[in-house]
Amino acid sequence: ATVLTAFAAKAGLPILLFVRACMGIGEGVAMPAMNNLLSKWVPVKERSRSLALVYSGMHLGSVTGLAFSPTFIHKFNWPSVFISFGSLGILWFAAWQYLAYSSPFEDPTMSSEERYLLVGNNQTKEPIAQIPWRLLLSKSPVWALIVCHFCHNWGTFILLTWMPTYYCQVLKFNLMESGMFSVLPWLTMALSANLGGWIADALVSKGVPITIVRKVMQTIGFLGPALSLTLLSHAKSPALAVCCMMCSQGCDAFSQSGLYSNHQDIGPRYAGVLLGLSNTAGVLAGVIGTATTGYILQHGTWNDVFKVAVGLYIFGTVFWNIFCTGEQIFD
């Protein structure tokens, strides 16, 4: 779909929208599938850092895209961005089909010692025949995931989609400078995600209850960006503004050892389903937040945009600490 975008744009708006919708359908199942795989392949004490390592690939992808896209557009044209990145996805798909397996039990190259290290004495369970939607939605920790994923993604999507505009309009960067400085927050996020993952797993290994670990990590992931965006509202120089965004995204990355690891904690067998539920709320936050930001900027200022995000971060912090648990509640 990414490759076809370059050609669909020339064919007309309806075809372009259809192609982008197809991309969204494909992207929509990626994170739930990834979470489900990690719940089968990674022991509990290594869960946070493994998830952080995998998610840091997404941040590095953002870094790569933001760094190279302006150059591609400047030297070639805008379709070259979609064709080049889409082609890389096709190559990855071929490698994934050849190398990936759904669980350690299905990997014919794995020794019994390696399999025991990953799953212990646990035996493979039958695939889920029917998803107990009523049971899942009756538990407050599930709603903690859904509500807090919405609050988290509101701020994240605003920075992802509006950061280049902020750099151009407020900080007066040109296209090349905007692309270069947009890289820094996402690079910080990739590094901080792995730091947070190692800290979380170290705490779990030392006997700290998983519930406390998840609450602490997510509190950093919410209040850190809230404080950084508050300071960003008062930044007087481009350098300070970029530093505030780097701090915001750096703290945001701790969410991967909080919110994003919690699906596997409360229901390993339903990790993909749970992430699908919460990520739906997260995507809605991206859609509504991006549109709302545009409306606010037409009638207000960037400070108003940041205030909304800060308010949601604070609300998410309170909601998470009241209803979150790190204990398994689904078989």
Image: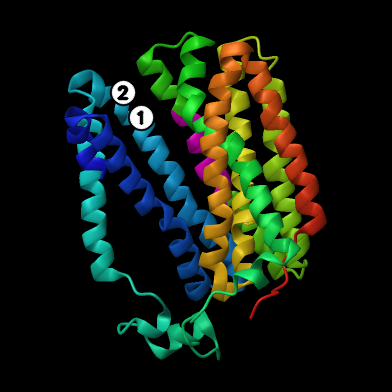
How many numbered markers are drawn? 2
Colour convention:
rainbow
Q: Decide if residue 43 is in sight here.
A: no
**Residue for badge 1:** 67
Residue type, mark 1 in image: Ala
Name the disc covering residue 70, or none.
Answer: 2
Highlighted range, magenta: 183-194
| Labels 1 & 2 near each other (Cβ < 8 A) | yes
Q: Secondary structure at mark 1?
A: helix
> Which label was assigned to residue 329?
none
Image vertical order of residue 124 relative to residue 145, above or below:
below
**Alpha carbon distance from label 1 to label 2:** 7 Å
Q: Residue at x 35, y 35 (%)?
A: 65
Query: Vertically, is 221 above or below 302?
Result: below
* Label 1 neighbour load within 10 Å: few <14, some 14-19, many 20+: many
| Quadrant housing the C terminus | bottom right
**x then y, percent, for residue 107:** 34, 81
Could you say which is closer to the camera, residue 65 or residue 157?
Answer: 157
